[in-house]
Amino acid sequence: MKHMPTETTFKYLNEVRFMTLSNWSVGAILSDKVLYKDGFKLEPIGNLIIRNREKEILEDDKAYKQVTIKLYGKGVIQRGDELIFGKNIGTKNQFRISEGQFIMSKIDARNGAFGIVPPELEGAITTQDFLSYNINTEKILPEFFNLITGTKHFAELCQKASSGTTGRQRVDEKAFLGFRIPVPQIEIQKEIVKQYRNNVEEEIQLQSTLIALKDEIDLYLNDKLGITSYNSQEPTKRFNVVSFSSLSEWGINSPMARMRNFYSNLKFRTLPISALCKISSGGTPSRSNKQYYGGEIPWIKTGEVRENIITETEEYITELGLKRSSAKLYPKGSLIVAMYGATAGRSAKLGIDATTNQACAVLHNINAELILTDFLWIYLISQIENFRLLASGSAQPNLNASKVANYLVPIPTISEQKQILDDINVIKDKISRLETEIERVSEQTKSQFESAIFNID
């Protein structure tokens, strides 16, 4: 029998000392091979963190903070907005956690559910499905450990240490603590953390500039049209005269009545949306009939209305579904206003012919002699808070077709509309470039840290 060359043999064979084994997984055994930069000491995680076993027996009349951990290393936060009394918590034997501890979910650790306990969760409680640890700060900085745990490789370690049925896999603590990670000297850790902080600070500053630029669009539009911001309004008059013909609903405190002050300094005439276009809604084919779904006709739900141009949809209906429901096919270029719940007031533009559900108001056949479609759309986007104000005036936070139809729109001349759009597009170009820069800095933040630790060159 012909023998394999020596160098080929050692590609497939690895010698591992028994005392270093944390489990019998080949993936685990090979997890620290070649991956890390040379020169860094590899320490078992169990040498760096110590299990927190501070128990808390819940009292019925005492209020507690509970914890949830976001997936993919996105942080540790409070569960819900309110404290919960012990009498309303089923499991009475829990654990108390402290600021700066490392915590992870047994079930979701394989999906990156771990992080550092923030100051606001000092003294919060967790069940045994959450493992919390004190960090040995003489060996590793909490912030450096937090960065390590946020890497893709660390998530892979958690996956390798998890076992059980699909969807209910729990991390094996012994296996997890046996995995080894790189631990540079404290001074090197400080330098790596410092560089990371500098990148994060740059990203924060860019994000602040981005927010200001987005606000600039509304400020510019309000200035050009003469719209008064609702937040800046103060009641200055005891009496107001309102033309009967301009009334849309009764009540001095109704949302529409309060919003009239928006238009007190307008530089242009106004028209209701109903005078500018046709307004219709959609419909939902019966879910019980499978023949109505899976066709080629785009069908839009309000969750897809995100101040975007819609070119594809999550669901499609058939010709039969269109025919046997109140859904209608609207042409490309139509505008959509979401009317129900949390999405009320958001708008989008059709980049394709599409249908919608009944929670969408569709503005179509827009009169091009009176208003440009993109000018109407940019105005609708700027009015989202006012639409929400109208929605909150109802028992349910919903708009309806009548409220959308009666909503007033300032009408500059077509040439003035074009100029306003050109000016806003200049701001949008700045926003686009800034978003690209933020993405670059974000990627740099991640890559600089990982390249300092891993052999990824």
Image (cartoon, rainbow, N blue to C red):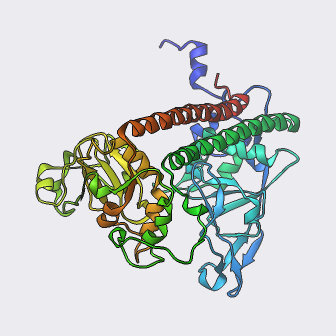
Is residue 361 visible in the rendered image? The answer is no
Labels in figure, total: 0
Kindly give the residue lying farthest to the bottom in the view shown.
61
Quadrant housing residue 249:
bottom left
Residue 29: percent from left, percent from top: 63, 37
Q: Residue at x 46, y 57 (%)?
A: 384
Quadrant housing residue 205:
top right
Residue 398: percent from left, percent from top: 38, 68
Left or right of 200? Residue 322 is left
Seen from the viewer's position, the closer of residues 4 and 138 is: 138
Left or right of 305? Residue 323 is left
Residue 172: percent from left, percent from top: 62, 54
Left or right of 330? Residue 158 is right
Is residue 445 visible in the rendered image? The answer is yes
Q: Which residue is drawn at 68% across and 45% down?
A: 149
Residue 371: percent from left, percent from top: 33, 44
Quadrant where the C terminus lies? top right
Seen from the viewer's position, the closer of residues 331 and 154 is: 331
Above or below for 11 versus 108: above
Above or below for 96 versus 268: below
Left or right of 456? Residue 418 is left
